[in-house]
Image: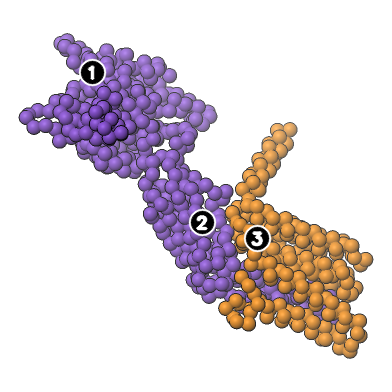
Chain colours: A orange, B purple
Amino acid sequence: MEAIAERSGRLVAVAARRYDIIRAAGAISLALRATIAVAAAVALFAMSRAEWHQVDVFFWLAMIAGAGAVVLPGSAAPLTMIISILFTWLIHADGEVDGALVVVAVSIGVLHMVCALAASMPMAAAAGVDVLRPWFAPLAAIVAATVLGALGVDALIDAELDGAWLVMLLPIVGTAGLALWWARPPDDPRSTTRR
Amino acid sequence: MTSTAVRAGSGEWRPTAAQLRAATVAVVALGVGVVARRADLMLFAVPFAIAATWGALRRPTASSDVQLGVEAASLFEGQSTRLFVAVDVGGPDIDVVTVVLEPDEFTVLDVASPVLAMAPSGSTRRTFDLRTVRWGKRAITVRQVVCTSPLGAYRSTKGPMRPIRMSTLPLRETFAAVDAIPRPAGIVGLHRSRRPGDGSEFADVRPFQLGDRLRRVNWPISLRTGELHVNSTWSDRDTEVVLILDTEHDYGHSEGIDGAASSLDTAVRATASIAEHYLRHGDRVSVVDLGQRVRRVPAGTGRGHLRRILDVLVAATPGEVRGGARRRIRPPRHGDLVVVLSPVTGTVAASQVAVLVAQGHTVILIDTLPTDIVAQSERGWATLAWRLRLLERQVELDQLMDLGVPVVAWRGSGSLDEVLRRVSRLSSAPRVRGGSSLAGASGSASGSRGGRR
């Protein structure tokens, strides 16, 4: 009985410490972590709604790693989650380019970006909204490139061209090239990025 | 203004976990997609390939300069000054600069977190209120400056930088005591005193200052000028007040100006207040530290001397008495008022007081031990040990009182009034052979410290 009381007391103490950490966290840090949680949840939910989906070890690993990414965005947890999703897709998916694929690809892209920003400052950092401003353009470019790439790949699959798997690289490389051209440093006169 | 600077982000840009993640996922997704002939897997590579290439293309070459400064490097307890953090980014390829400030335990920053994340474009400057809540040498520094490139791809870390040091002077409360000195020495000779103070010799007419007595107001000049003026006089007294500080131990918790005070806090603050009071009245004040942690301040007068005393008190730290119990302080002149500020728990204070009394000096002992010291101590045997030590201490205090040393607790303004009155009256009374006239003073004054514990 005493051991249970001691253990529960310790748990309460740990919870109180955690609560202190959350209270000390900055609003931007909390917002970024909330975005990571939402992105991870959307990716997992979209994947779980697919017809081919099965709950396997990779799915559970992705869930756990997603929770880890919320707490430690600068750790290996985001990478573990993304790789787990990739393997789930590789093993179970039927290879079609559909809405679920686009949603999952965009979600893990957003998750990666937000994890990168959240890892650039401690959780207790007092940050203004101006910190987010430089990240909007790359995020929009990545989302747009993913959607455009999916549309291009889908169009090529429908066209039933020979040697399609090589041809499919074209829209991917094309959209990536466009995004990178847009991301040229501002001192370059050809750049369209405004900081 | 005092400031310090550090240059961060000059070289040593390392890829972050985000950059490695982007490159890994892009390579794995593309490779597996091509090998397995799966277009859907190749599509997963798109955002990561873009992020990895974007980050690599924007690898920074510039550096950022971070400057930290305060407007005033010397403050009184509880006062505030402005702290600024200036970040100057040399190029466009730094997106986030994170500055981790490390304030002293007794330095309070008016900011939610000492970690600042900024997105500087060119020069950015942030200013905060900084308040020091305890006397002593305070320091604030930048522990780390982290610069992050676009998309969090590369990071450069620098720090810590050289700290900014500030002095927090231990003068907060206004102390006042009766104008009684046990054996005041008058000016001898035809020449008047060089020092302003209480006296009868006219010196000057000057504007009214806080603490001036109303009877000193020069009404005709005040009416004519529309501002209060007072007559200042040259001091008639030549008394030296010797303040003996015991820094051997520090008991109790120090929570700054707004919280509990340790024994050393009380001693240092009381020393500053008493010195300020007597210097304001034109007396000479010297400060001696029993532990020799604080440099001895020879007797002097005036506001400059007060500043000298405060600057020296800032360095007070507890520590073993150099020279031990055998060490003897230089005896004050006959007639000087000696005030000892001590918790009377160490090895030296009680014996030094006894020696001074034996030499014929008038000594007042201010007991600085916190009253709740037993409650603060740990449970179990430590409390018992403390009680035993306090009983021994009470015996030592009783022996000092038997020698005629009044023992009072520090309660701020007016703490010494009763003792000074009695000591002055008794010192001017005719002495009776075979007995000490001061014993009466100690008997009455000791009541203010309470009985045995």
Q: Position of residue B411 (x, y in %)?
A: 39, 25
User: Does residue B42 sit above or below B404 in this rendering?
Assistant: below
Q: Which residue is mark 2?
A: B126
* C-alpha distance separating marks 3 and 1: 71 Å
Q: Which residue is mark 3?
A: A118
**Residue A84 in view here:** no
Q: Position of residue B368 (x, y in %)?
A: 37, 28
Q: Quadrant of residue B97?
A: bottom right
Q: Amino acid at mark 3?
A: Ala
Give the residue at x 78% y 80%.
Answer: A172
Q: Quadrant of residue B24?
A: bottom right
Judged by depth in the image, the label closer to the viewer, 1 or 2, is: 2
Q: Amino acid at mark 2?
A: Arg
Give the residue at x 25% y 41%.
Answer: B304
| Residue B34 image label | none
Q: Position of residue A128 (x, y in %)?
A: 61, 57
What residue occupies the far bottom of the structure in this picture?
A162
Q: Label 3 lies in what chain? A: A
